[in-house]
Image: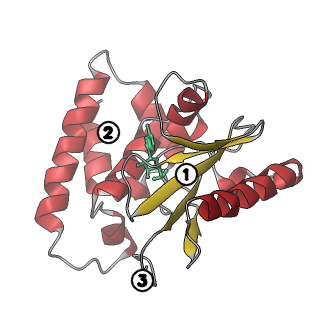
Amino acid sequence: MSAIARVLFLKSPSSVSPKTLQRIASSSTTSSSSSTSSLLKRGRARTQTQQTKTPKTRTMASTPKNDEQLNAQEAILKGMQDSTEPTIFDKIVSKEIPATVLYEDNLAMAFKDVNPVAKTHFLVIPKIKAGLSQLSKANEDHKMLLGHCMYVAQMVAKQEKLEKGFRVVINDGVDGCQSVYHLHLHVIGGQQLSWPPGC
Ligand code: AMP
């Protein structure tokens, strides 16, 4: 990663378009992954030192404030948004990566989130991504699959005894803190949740 790219990212990551970030990432030298990781370490250090400051402008708000925002920006930086490579969730579907699977049919799978944010936290994914890297990529052809994932979400919620309620969340894109570009529904519950979610 060139010095210019680092400055661009560290100065104002979200003011750089995803395409520019991808071009930067793909034009990296062989040491790109270590450069990326040092870049992210610097980003994290910067995040920690800036946590006490209140963001006032769009640019300041784009500075990662926590790991979720940083992961989302890392995904963009690595070009994962438009990647055709198998996602980590494809690898869970193919059993290449282990997961605690709660439900599976021919279209969808539900498994526990590895980093739960509530007592119960599972994800529902379409088994075949079918272009649905994120919700905003949905078209008419996806309606049935999207409906099915919603149906599975409530079915597994019942199975997990979330009878007092639960929340379904879909993070979309960098502003939505999406880090895995394979559509997924977060289902969280098992405790009293608060509202609104973090803004
Ligand atoms: P998002 O940030 O909305 O894209 O959510 C991605 C979610 O995937 C996060 O909550 C992660 O904790 C979760 N996750 C990432 N890798 C795995 C994995 N191998 N098994 C289960 N959940 C995972």
Is residue 171 shown to the viewer in this render?
no
**At 30% across and 81% down in the image, what residue appears?**
56
Mark 2 / mark 1, whichever is N-terminal: 2
Q: Amino acid at mark 3?
A: Ser
- 26, 129: nearer the viewer: 129
Looking at the rendering, in which quadrant would you find the N terminus?
top left
Residue 75 image point, x, y percent: 44, 42
Per the rendering, the mark at residue 123 is 1
Residue 71 image point, x, y percent: 36, 48
- Which is in the foreground here, disc 3 or disc 2? 3
Q: Amino acid at mark 1?
A: Leu
Is residue 85 shown to the viewer in this render?
yes
Name the quadrant containing residue 168: bottom right
Element type where label 2 sits in the image: helix
Name the quadrant containing residue 69: bottom left
> What is the CA distance from the residue labelled 2 to the residue labelled 1?
34 Å
- 39, 171: nearer the viewer: 171
Mark 1 / mark 3, whichever is N-terminal: 1
Residue marked by disc 2: 5
Marks 1 and 3 in Cβ contact (< 8 Å): no
Looking at the rendering, in which quadrant would you find the C terminus?
bottom left
| The residue at label 1 has a CB less than 8 Å from ligand 1 | yes
| The residue at label 2 has a CB less than 8 Å from ligand 1 | no
- Which is in the foreground here, disc 2 or disc 1? 1
**At 72% across and 53% down in the image, what residue appears?**
149
Mark 3 / mark 2, whichever is N-terminal: 2
From this view, report whether residue 141 is shown above or below residue 85. below
Q: Amino acid at mark 2?
A: Ala
